[in-house]
């Protein structure tokens, strides 16, 4: 393999592991990358030596601790770059704006700009939640094939957070179909009673890499024009994604 090709293929292996919840067997990696077993073995040896992959007792491979250091730095940098765009969303809606990413099977909030209002919502930066009950989680799942979504929720389950939480796969797949069609997702008190959120995706080229949302008390979010808000938020998210592409 040439140097550039080997790097490209090593990244394919890491992404295949990430798409399977951070852990997979050799056959799953091969299915996800289309690479020959011998090539995968050679790549894994280097990734194991550098700590980017570890091997479990059952001989499955998992993402290694070296990635934590890189991801933490990358998330902080992305969070800083997101601040002016989140500020625009606060100005647009009057509500708290958030940036979140999907790490393995969890949504992680990586940046926030709070609403100037006294009564406002907070999602602590660094907080990890399951994706099925949040607007940002729905957007991020909608960016993946239904087969990957099914595998994700099979691993995590879909615990009920409130009376409005979607807790079955067919219901979630139907919801994600609506998200893809309309271009935004809603959390109508599904993660926390009385809190509503609207989220849109952030794309780096063709890949969805993050989600941006506004959240606030249900009555204030419901008073906003949902379609107008989503359209303007998508424009802000598009501008942010364009910056990330450089």
Image (tube, rainbow, N blue to C red):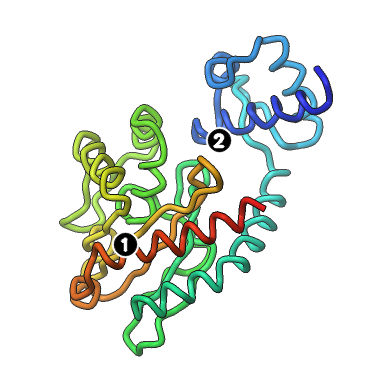
Nearest to N terminus: mark 1 or mark 2? 2
Query: Looking at the image, is 174 positioned above or below residue 191?
Result: above
Task: Tell me what residue is drawn at x 62 percent, y 66 percent.
Answer: 81
Quadrant of the rendered image containing residue 242: bottom right
Quadrant of the rendered image containing residue 213: bottom left
Q: Quadrant of the N terminus?
A: top right
Element marked by disc 2: helix
Quadrant of the rendered image containing residue 96: bottom left
- How far separated are the C-alphas under marks 1 and 2? 29 Å
Q: Which mark is residue 230?
A: 1
At label 2, counting other C-alpha atoms closer than 10 Å, the crowd grade (few under 14, some 14-19, many 20 or more) is: some
Q: Which mark is residue 18?
A: 2
Left or right: 216 with respect to 20?
A: left
| 205 or 200: nearer the viewer | 205
Element marked by disc 1: helix
At label 1, counting other C-alpha atoms closer than 10 Å, the crowd grade (few under 14, some 14-19, many 20 or more) is: many
Task: Tell me what residue is drawn at x 38 percent, y 30 percent.
Answer: 151
Q: Going by the picture, which residue comes out furthest to the right?
A: 3
């Amino acid at each position: 393999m040439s140097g550039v090709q080997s790097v490209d293929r090593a990244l394919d292996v890491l992404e295949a592991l990430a798409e399977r919840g951070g852990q997979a067997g050799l056959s799953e990696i091969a299915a996800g990358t289309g690479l020959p077993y011998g090539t995968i073995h050679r790549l894994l040896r280097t990734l194991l030596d550098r700590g980017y992959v570890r091997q479990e007792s059952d001989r499955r491979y998992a993402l290694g601790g070296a990635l934590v250091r890189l991801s933490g730095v990358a998330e902080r940098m992305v969070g800083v770059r997101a601040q002016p765009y989140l500020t625009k969303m606060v100005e647009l809606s009057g509500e708290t704006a958030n940036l979140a990413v999907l790490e393995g099977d969890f949504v992680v909030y990586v940046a926030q700009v709070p609403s100037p209002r006294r009564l406002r919502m907070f999602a602590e930066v660094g907080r990890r939640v399951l994706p099925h009950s949040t607007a940002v989680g729905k957007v991020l799942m909608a960016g993946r094939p239904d087969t990957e979504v099914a595998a994700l929720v099979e691993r995590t389950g879909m615990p009920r957070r409130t009376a409005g939480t979607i807790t079955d796969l067919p219901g979630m797949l139907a919801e994600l179909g609506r998200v893809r069609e309309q271009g935004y997702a809603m959390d109508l008190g599904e993660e926390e009673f009385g809190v509503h959120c609207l989220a849109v995706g952030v794309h780096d080229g063709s890949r969805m890499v993050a989600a941006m949302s506004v959240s606030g008390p249900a009555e204030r979010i419901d008073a906003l024009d949902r379609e107008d808000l989503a359209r303007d938020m998508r424009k802000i998210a598009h501008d942010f994604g364009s910056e990330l592409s450089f």
